[in-house]
Image: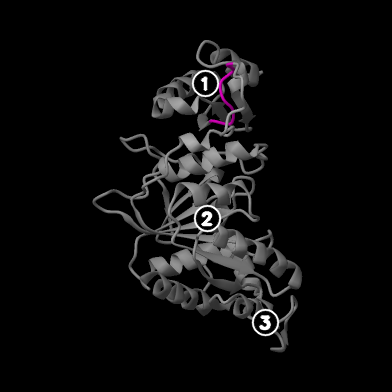
């Protein structure tokens, strides 16, 4: 019933076919993508605000998040297919108030990339830098859980930019703060691209007078739309690739390495996660996923090997409970990254 009321509220403001991915959670939080003409640029922000106000007036709605996307051109006939069907070329390359941007990536999921990204970002922040953490995994955002932050919509500043949450000395932003954690994101690639673009552009990461020192971006697994958006729209200073020692994981890590190379993003190095397990009872060391695979691959590819992180139950428990892990390897890796960025 609420969905029908939302659709009725938007009549006269936007065309029904331009509203996509409408989701409503049990708490009344509404999220949808609004297709707009990319040629209109920032003028469409007024339309977004009108749509948001109209939906907020619906009984039972507690919060509204609208993502502007140029997934397709408005319904006007053309003789030839558009050269930019996703509309991303109309979004200018971003000049962000951030000194250094680091992407933490992996070729596949399940290798602990997000945990590594959080702990490395926190280790960098402990050196006295201002550091942000952006969760760019639209389909599976895990940073809210990893940081122990509440699943609630962030506030806006006077310039209508989202104010990032603070945790572990970091400025944190994720699409996960705007949707119910049990709600799947059934979005196509162009909608994902637009969402990431807006989380880069419309978040108060810093200012011209006081820019953020480092933004760590927790990338989704794979080599798809999110990676393409970053390569095309911002200057990435380096990428960190996370893999387990297992051959199956390394196969996909290699694809991630080559993808960044082809888009002229420097590879800062390779991290071997879940490297080995030490029994807490007897001290026996067991390389469950193999041994030294990532280190050998880094040597073969001519990139830095940043270090090994153990397969440790305490790291798993800390991640589930929104805590940092007291593992020296994270600090060592952060120091190597700092040296690479200075070079």
What residue is at 64 percent from the left and 16 percent from the top? 4
Residue, disc 1: 55
What residue is at 65 percent from the left and 37 percent from the top? 188
Answer above or below: position of 121 versus 301: above
Residue, disc 2: 148
Q: Is residue 124 visible?
A: yes
First to last magenta residue range? 70-76
Residue, disc 3: 292
Q: Earlier in the sequence, mark 1 or mark 2?
A: 1
Residue 272 position, x and y percent, is: 62, 74
Relative depth, front residue between 186 and 147: 186
Residue 337 position, x and y percent, is: 45, 72
**Mark nearer the viewer, 1 or 2:** 1
Q: Secondary structure at mark 2?
A: loop
Magenta residues: mostly which secondary structure?
Answer: loop
In which quadrant of the rendered image does the C terminus lie?
bottom left
Residue 113 position, x and y percent, is: 60, 63
Answer above or below: position of 201 versus 63: below
Q: CA distance from mark 3 to mark 2?
A: 32 Å
In which quadrant of the rendered image does the N terminus lie?
top right
């Amino acid at each position: 019933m609420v969905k029908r009321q939302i659709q009725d509220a938007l009549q006269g403001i936007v065309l029904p076919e331009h509203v996509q991915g409408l989701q409503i959670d049990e708490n009344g939080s509404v999220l949808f993508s609004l297709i707009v003409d990319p040629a209109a640029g920032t003028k469409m922000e007024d339309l977004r605000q009108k749509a948001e106000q109209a939906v907020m007036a619906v009984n039972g709605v507690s919060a509204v998040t609208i993502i502007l996307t140029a997934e397709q051109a408005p319904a006007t006939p053309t003789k030839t297919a558009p050269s930019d069907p996703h509309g991303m070329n109309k979004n200018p390359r971003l000049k962000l108030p951030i000194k250094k941007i680091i992407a933490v990536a992996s070729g596949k999921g399940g290798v602990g990339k997000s945990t590594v990204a959080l702990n490395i970002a926190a280790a960098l922040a402990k050196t006295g830098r201002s550091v942000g953490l952006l969760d760019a995994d639209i389909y599976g955002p895990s940073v809210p859980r990893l940081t122990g932050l509440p699943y609630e919509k962030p506030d806006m500043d006077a310039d209508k930019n989202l104010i990032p949450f603070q945790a572990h000395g970091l400025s944190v932003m994720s699409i996960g703060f705007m949707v119910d954690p049990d709600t799947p994101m059934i979005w196509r690639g162009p909608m994902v691209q637009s969402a990431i673009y807006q989380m880069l552009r419309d978040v108060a990461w810093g200012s011209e007078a006081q820019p953020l020192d480092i933004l760590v971006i927790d990338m989704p697994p794979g080599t798809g739309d999110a990676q393409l958006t970053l390569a095309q729209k911002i200057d990435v200073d380096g990428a960190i690739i996370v893999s387990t020692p297992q051959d199956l994981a390394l196969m996909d890590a290699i694809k991630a390495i080559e993808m960044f190379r082809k888009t002229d993003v420097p590879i800062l190095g390779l991290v071997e996660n879940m490297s080995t397990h030490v029994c807490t009872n007897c001290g026996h060391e067991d390389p469950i996923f193999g041994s030294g695979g990532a280190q050998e691959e880094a040597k073969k590819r001519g990139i830095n090997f940043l270090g090994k992180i153990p397969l440790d139950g305490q790291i798993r428990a800390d991640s589930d409970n929104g805590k940092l892990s007291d593992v020296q390897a994270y600090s060592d890796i952060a120091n190597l990254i700092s040296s690479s960025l200075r070079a």
